[in-house]
């Protein structure tokens, strides 16, 4: 294999790769065998057609074209290794010569891994804060557990704090219905504060079959298109239920599979603490990576790489939207943007994500941090145990792609741990 390298820019090189006849022949034979499985020639079984006869039937050029992709998949990685290139993203392949009896020649325009000059990464200013128990969340969790075992009694009196009502509501801004602003026989717990401020208070005093219209202003921190706007609410109550909550005692704890109320309370506090610590860890990691990006210098990021990351972000958003049982096209219409608009919006964030990955990778290299095979094996085995009752999951868990993902997860975790030791 002959490889000629031409530098196009700091972010791209062009490789001209030439394969001689001897290197080409095995791929041509495999391609011929694949094609012979698909064609019917009288007197021969599929897959057993002699090459010369197949060549007459389909044309030798077609066999070479079929073989070309396999040639590229085999030779391109070898060329990259030979030239010691740090590649990122997919190469653009252009055919130069694919003709029987001649060397195969193609060009690969290769996006290069941008170089990073690290700043003083051992002096981390970001700090991870100690977490404090969220007492409001703790009390709310206890209350939610009581509600899980609550009894409901249909009443004819006026609704009061703590009652549950079934109601229809319709919300309009400027006379126009808002998205998600209509409900039919919705359960509303007065005092639960799951609606905008003032809404549940307006329901106090209402009775079965009563209707009411009132105005409220959306909070400043509400989603942009509604923040601080006045809205008209039309509500009709169907039923009012009095909620009888069970006592908070050992009997309730036993119903929830705990021996005592104390054990239940300790478990709730432990879970809340874990959530708070996880949130603080994520906040710390974001702050560290942002600090490292600001301290470091980067070669220009290839446009192709930014484009690929923007597409990835688009798919992530689409996945999140469809998970909420919404159509992505409807979502785009609501925010009055096209996919191309979103990609432009994602540009800076995509570049930031790429820089984050580059700087973490560079620190791992400098600090000689690696994901040991035994560590990856353990993570894979833990996943297999988690999904042992899902037969279809086994193949994916043991796939090379999953192993590569797990290596990246371990590498990221160990690099963050090293950075955290510098912050201390």
Image (cartoon, rainbow, N blue to C red):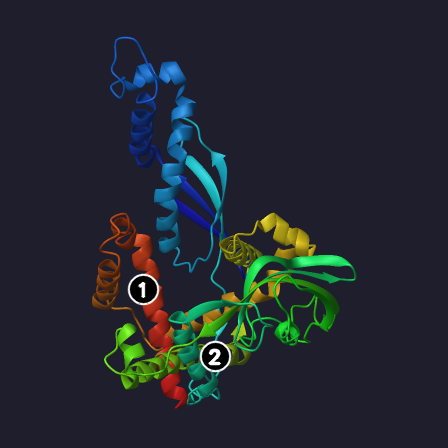
Residue 367: give x, y in percent of width and height.
Answer: 34, 78
> 177 left or right of 118?
right
**Cβ atoms at labels 2 and 1 below 8 Å apart:** no
Q: Quadrant of residue 274?
A: bottom left
Tell me: residue 41, above or below residue 252: above
Query: Residue, x 32% and y 69% (percent of image)?
Result: 410
The outermost residue toward the top is: 42
Residue 253: give x, y in percent of width and height.
Answer: 29, 78
Mark earlier in primary sequence (2, 1) = 2
In front: label 2 or label 1? 2
Q: Is residue 239 visible?
A: yes
Whole-angstrom CA distance, mark 2 to mark 1, is: 23 Å
Q: Is residue 339 visible?
A: no
Closer-to-camera residue (315/362): 315
Q: Quadrant of residue 157?
A: bottom right
Query: Residue, x 72% and y 73% (percent of image)?
Result: 217
Query: Residue, x 31% and y 16% (percent of image)?
Result: 52
Closer-to-camera residue (35/73): 35
Label 1, residues with CA under 10 Å away: few <14, some 14-19, many ≥20: many
> 157 left or right of 107?
right
Circle 2 sits on which residue? 283
The number of discs equals 2
Circle 1 sits on which residue? 407
Circle 2 SS class: helix
Query: Residue, x 72% and y 72% (percent of image)?
Result: 216
Circle 1 SS class: helix
Image quadrant holding the N terminus, namely top left
Residue 318: give x, y in percent of width and height.
Answer: 54, 54
Tell me: residue 80, above or below residue 139: above
């Amino acid at each position: 294999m002959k490889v000629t390298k031409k530098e196009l820019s700091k972010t791209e090189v062009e490789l001209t790769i030439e394969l001689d006849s001897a290197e080409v022949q095995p791929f041509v034979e495999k391609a011929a065998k694949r094609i012979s499985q698909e064609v019917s020639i009288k007197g021969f079984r599929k897959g057993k057609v002699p090459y010369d006869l197949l060549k007459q039937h389909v044309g030798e050029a077609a066999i070479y074209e079929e073989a070309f992709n396999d040639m590229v998949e085999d030779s391109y990685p070898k060329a990259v290794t030979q030239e010691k290139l740090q590649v990122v993203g997919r190469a653009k392949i252009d055919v130069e010569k694919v003709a029987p009896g001649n060397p195969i020649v193609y060009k690969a325009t290769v996006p290069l891994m941008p170089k990073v000059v690290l700043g003083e990464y051992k002096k981390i200013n970001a700090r991870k804060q100690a977490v404090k128990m969220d007492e409001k969340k703790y009390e709310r969790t206890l209350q939610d557990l009581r509600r899980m075992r609550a009894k409901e009694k249909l009443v004819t009196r006026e609704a009061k704090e703590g009652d549950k009502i079934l109601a229809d509501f319709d919300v309009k801004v400027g006379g126009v219905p808002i998205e998600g602003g209509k409900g039919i026989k919705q359960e509303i717990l007065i005092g639960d504060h799951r609606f905008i401020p003032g809404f549940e208070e307006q329901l106090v005093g209402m009775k079965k079959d009563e209707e009411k219209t009132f105005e409220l202003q959306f909070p400043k921190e509400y989603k942009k298109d509604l923040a601080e706007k006045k809205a008209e609410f039309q509500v009709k109550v169907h039923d009012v239920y009095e909620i009888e909550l069970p006592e908070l005692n050992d009997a309730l704890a036993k119903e929830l599979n705990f021996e005592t109320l104390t054990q239940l309370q300790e478990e709730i506090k432990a879970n809340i603490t874990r959530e708070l610590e996880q949130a603080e860890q994520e906040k710390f990691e974001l702050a560290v990576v942002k600090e490292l990006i600001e301290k470091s210098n980067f070669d220009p990021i290839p446009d192709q790489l930014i484009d690929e990351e923007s597409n990835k972000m688009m798919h992530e958003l689409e996945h999140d939207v469809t998970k909420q049982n919404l159509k992505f096209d409807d979502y785009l219409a609501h925010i009055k943007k096209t996919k191309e608009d979103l990609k432009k919006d994602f540009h800076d964030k995509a570049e930031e994500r790429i820089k984050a990955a580059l700087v973490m990778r560079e620190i791992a290299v400098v600090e000689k941090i690696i994901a040991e095979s035994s560590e990856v094996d353990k993570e894979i085995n833990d996943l297999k145990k988690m999904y042992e009752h899902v037969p279809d999951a086994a193949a994916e868990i043991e796939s090379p792609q999953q192993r590569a993902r797990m290596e990246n997860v371990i590498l990221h975790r160990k690099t963050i741990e090293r950075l955290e030791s510098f912050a201390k």
